[in-house]
Amino acid sequence: MVGPILVFDSGVGGLSVANSLRQHYPDAAMCYACDNAWLPYGLRDDEALAERIVAVCQAAVDACQASVLVVACNTASTLALEGLRQTLSIPVIGTVPAIKPAALISQTRHIGLLATTATVNRPYTQSLVDDFASDCRVSKIAADALVTEAEAWLAGATLSEARLNQALLPLWQAMRATPALDTVVLGCTHFPLLKPVLASLAPISVQWVDSGDAIARRVGQVANILASGSSDGRCYTTAAADPLVDGFAQYGFQAPQRLILSGSEAVVYGAGRP
Ligand code: DGL
C-alpha cells in the first residue's frame, strides 16, 4: 500500500519540515497532524508525553493511511521514536538537532543549540554533542517562548521583537563570547519558521542550521513517494485550530479536521489534562 507522507508535530513547527519535503518532492501526497491540545511539548512530563505521542501518531496514521511518518519535532523524537517504531508498521523518520552538520561547518568551534527545555536537557542531545561536537563549545539555550511566538505568528499575530529579544538574550550573549559563536542549530522545528526574523535581530551574522533537508533526503531513501491521493493535503489537530486555517493553507494543507483518539486513549488523556 502506498499512502501519503504524514508530518507530525506538537503544533505548526512541522510546517517547516513539510516545506523542505515539498521542495524535494513537489508532487508528493502529504498530510499534517499536530497535537495542539498538548502544545507546547517542551515543558511536559516525559512519561505522559511519550505515551501521548504514540497514541496521537497512531490515530493520525490510521486516519490518512500514511505510508511513512515524519516526526517533525525534536522534542517528540528525542523521547518517543523507539515507542513509535515498536507500535507502527510503517517507517518512522525522526528529527534530531542538527549538531553534526553544525560541527562540520563551524570555524570558531563554538556552536549554539536553540531548542525547547526538554530537548536541551535530554541525554539524547548530550550524546549527539559527545559523538559529533566533542571539540566544540556548545552553548545550549532553551527558548520555549519562541514556540508560542511562532504559533501566534502563523495565526496572524504580529511578532514582538521585545519578547523575541528577551528569549534570545542568552544566545546574543554567546555570540559575543570568546571564541564567538558562529553557528546556531535550530533544534526545534518551530524556529526555522522565524529564521528571517532571528537573523535580522542577531547582533552578528551567523550560520543557522536546521534538519529539514536531511529529513527530506531520508524520507526519499526509505519510502515510496505517492504522487497524489485522496487524502493529500489533509490536516488533523487534537484541539480547535480556527485561527490557523490560513496559515495551514499557505503550506498547502486543508482546513484542519479534529483527530479522534480511540476510546480508551480519549479517556486516559481527556481527564485532568491541562
Ligand atoms: N516543534 C517542536 C520541536 O521541534 C517543539 C515545540 C513544543 O515545545 O511543543 O521540538
Image: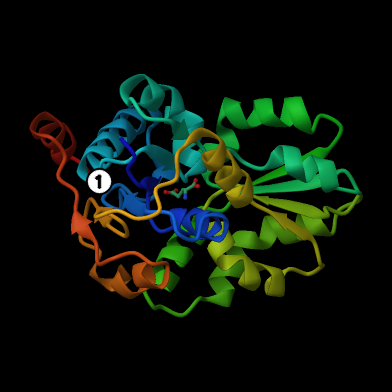
User: Relative to residue 72, is residue 181 drawn left or right?
Assistant: right
**Looking at the picture, how far across and down is residue 231, in whole percent?**
26, 53
Residue depicted at 39% across the width and 46% down the height: 5
Q: Is residue 235 above or below residue 112?
A: below
Residue depicted at 29% across the width and 53% down the height: 229
Q: Evaluate whether residue 9 shows in this view.
A: no
Residue closer to the observer: 93 or 162: 93
Residue depicted at 80% across the width and 41% down the height: 103
Q: Image quadrant of residue 124?
A: top right
Q: In this view, does 261 lie above or below 251?
A: above
Residue closer to the observer: 169 or 126: 126
Q: Image quadrant of residue 251?
A: bottom left
Residue closer to the observer: 237 or 19: 19
Of all residues shown, which one is farthest toward the top?
86
Tell me the kind of residue under disc 1: Cys
Residue depicted at 51% across the width and 33% down the height: 222
Q: In this view, does 233 lie above or below 118?
A: below
Q: Quadrant of the N terminus?
A: top left
**Looking at the picture, how far across and down is residue 105, in whole percent?**
84, 47
- Which residue is denoted by mark 1 in the rendering? 64
